[in-house]
Image: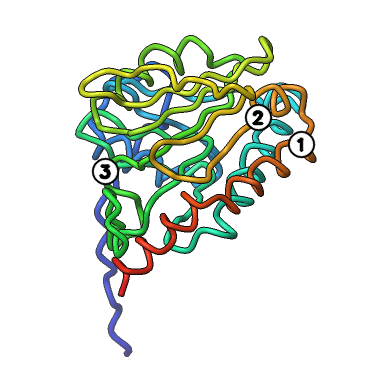
Amino acid sequence: MASRTTQRPRPHEPTLPPLEPGDRLTRDEFERRYNAMPDLKKAELIEGEVHMSSAVRWNQHAGPHADLIGWLVGYRAYTPGVQVGDNGSLRLDLENMPQPDASLILEPACGGQVKLSPDDYIVGAPEWVGEVSASTLSLDLNKKLRVYRRNNVLEYLVWRVMDREVDWFVLCGSDYERLPLTSTGLYQSKIFPGLWLDPAALARRDMAAVLRVVQQGTQSAEHAEFVARLQQKSS
């Protein structure tokens, strides 16, 4: 008679609670719960509190978001040593893991201030961060601004879509100051030479004008010098 094999019951594996807006969590716990929800598209930990976006509207966010990324990609195409990220989570500190709409970094090999973790997250603050802001305006210009400033994000752009305005902040010492417009109404980055923006054209979604201006920036003498410095560092 064949012996019967007794199967031991499997140990109970506790189910992680889902992320909910307003949860107060450490960054490690936030990551564990976020990773357990693969269908969740966007959640952020800001000052220890979970923030989750609502359904994304086309003209208030999806379209402007694509335009912002397109502008940055137009710069990256002519600037080796620079990378653009779309909606990448950032490990800033123990209570903050934002997921900005756009990030621009110097590669670590070129002297950038971020690192890439073994599990493929950005650790530290990108040199440049951008947010497309409609329903999240209060968060982007208050809590997030303070978090980015404290963690040494060198430049921070907020596109206030409903107001048709673009704010560009640059870190000066321990505080953000507004980047001044040139006499021709352009923003010109101090951290990324050649990253030029016509904010009025971006606000009205005139991408032909936006791309013409960034192309002019990448053809400037200061951009050529910047690229040469990056190439020297990487070699």
The image quadrant that residue 139 belongs to is top left
Query: Of the numbered discs in the image, which one, if any, rests on residue 124?
Result: 3
Q: Is residue 170 above or below residue 228?
A: above
Cα gap from disc 3 to disc 1, whole angstroms: 33 Å
Q: Residue at x 31, y 57 (%)?
A: 116
Say which of marks 3 and 1 sits in front.
1
Q: Residue furthest bottom?
A: 1
Q: Say which residue label 1 marks.
A: 209
Q: Earlier in the sequence, mark 3 or mark 1?
A: 3
Q: Which residue is mark 2?
A: 198
Q: Position of residue 143 (x, y in %)?
A: 35, 15
Determine whether label 2 and label 1 are within 8 Å by CB.
Answer: yes
Contact, mark 3 vs mark 1 (Cβ under 8 Å): no
Q: Which residue does the image show at 71% across and 43% down from the upper left?
A: 211
In the image, what residue occupies the spot 46% across and 18% down? 140
Q: Amino acid at mark 3?
A: Gly
Q: CA distance from mark 2 to mark 1?
A: 8 Å
Query: Is 72 on the left-hand or right-hand side of 98?
Result: right
Residue 166 tag number: none
Q: Residues within 10 Å of mark 2 (few under 14, many from 20)?
A: many
Q: Amino acid at mark 2?
A: Asp
Q: Amino acid at mark 1?
A: Ala
